[in-house]
Image (cartoon, helix red, strand yellow):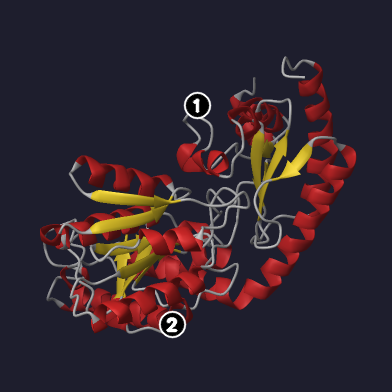
Amino acid sequence: MKNQNDFKTKKSIYFDYAASTPIDPLVFKSMFTVFEKYYANTMSIHSLGQESKDLLEKTRESFAKLLKVNASEIIFTSSASESNNFVLKGIANAYRNVDGRVIVSNIEHPCVLNSSHWLEKSGYKVDYVSVDRNGIVNLDELTSLIKDSTVLISIMHVNNEIGVIEPIEKIGKIISSIKEYRKKRNIETPLYFHTDASQSFGKIDVNINKIGCDLLTLSSHKIYGPKGAGLLYIKKGTKITPLIHGGGQEFGFRSSTVNLPAIFGFYKAAEIAIKRQKQDSQKAAKLKAKIVKTLQSKLANCYLNGSSITQIPNIISIRFDFIEGEALVYLLDNNNICASSASACASLSLSPSHVLLALGLKPEQAHSTIRLSIGRFTTNEDVNYLLKVLPDIITKLRNISPFK
């Protein structure tokens, strides 16, 4: 077991960027002035409060230009989980009187699935659309699930465990055509489309207008920004009930004293991510290809989970049959390599990953999977060290495995 001094003297090799990213030094530096100068409450009417308010609105406008939407459609939250809870519960509460239904995929992030389960316990009807063995949402099934009473469809852009890119532009077009069909039939119940783009933004293009969504979630700490900041795009005219009531901040959608330093740092991180997107993605793709090719050449019964064609470049969900993923993560950590057996939000659960089970994997196959995620500060030397250590650990675990 590691002692405290080990963590102080040995460098950890980080392959868990999909869980959280280190803050970019440029972002960290940019936040100093905000902490020092803009400490007043944005709701205060005195000059210092108005200076803080002005910075908040300038930051909102800058974010809006980055996303090509109106500034009034940008709502700052504390996290992607808060934003996603707000969407599901807020839309459902707004349309409870019409017996509205909600559709989500069965591989959504726990914050979406647990919100859906909460809605079901409250008497709401939730439909779950399945995915194929590659992790792609079944579009025919999705279309068949949409009823006249369906008010919300929430499908993530990129899955946080397997990195698969969902066909959300196609989903947006399906939803748009159904809206038109409702209009012709004089059905007034709206149909909103939400996507969680926390894992896609900064890695691949995220164009709200092309997607055709009404609501979209982003997260700061997934793009080298500070924790404690999230964003929710809410298209003008969307009817949604606030989760947090109070002083009326964020246009009344999200009351709470604004975390201005985190929001400002979030924007700086987003600005850098967009500028570096091609550079970072090309680097990640090259390192990912090296990892997968080397491991599959060195180890038998080694498989990539999810579609290799429609994956973002920085996430590797890889299965090593006849081992226990948790044991592998532990032994990697003993060698100063940080990885995960599933998403960070579900890592405390002993149950097999719901995402991998949805692909058709057996529980023992799901348990033999780890997730490696590459980031801006991953080096070729980091990858070489991983490829030196990992095969030996797999061999040792298989030698003592009862599953052979």
Task: Check disc 2 and report the residue beneath it.
Answer: 209
Callout 2: few (<14), some (14-19), or many (20+) C-alpha neighbours within 10 Å? few
Three-letter amino acid code of the residue under disc 1: Leu
Quadrant position of residue 245 = bottom left
Three-letter amino acid code of the residue under disc 2: Asn
Residue 102 screen position, x and y as percent: 29, 57
Q: What kind of element bears circle 1? A: loop
Callout 1: few (<14), some (14-19), or many (20+) C-alpha neighbours within 10 Å? few
Q: Quadrant of the N terminus?
A: top right
Q: What kind of element bears circle 2? A: helix
**Extreme-right residue of the structure:** 297
Left/right of residue 73 with respect to residue 310 in the rendered view: left
Residue 361 screen position, x and y as percent: 61, 37
Residue 401 screen position, x and y as percent: 74, 17
Point out which mark residue 48 bears: none
Point out which mark residue 350 bears: 1
Quadrant position of residue 237 = bottom left
Give the residue drawn at x 50%, y 74%.
Answer: 169
Between 222 and 212, the residue placed more toward the observer is 212
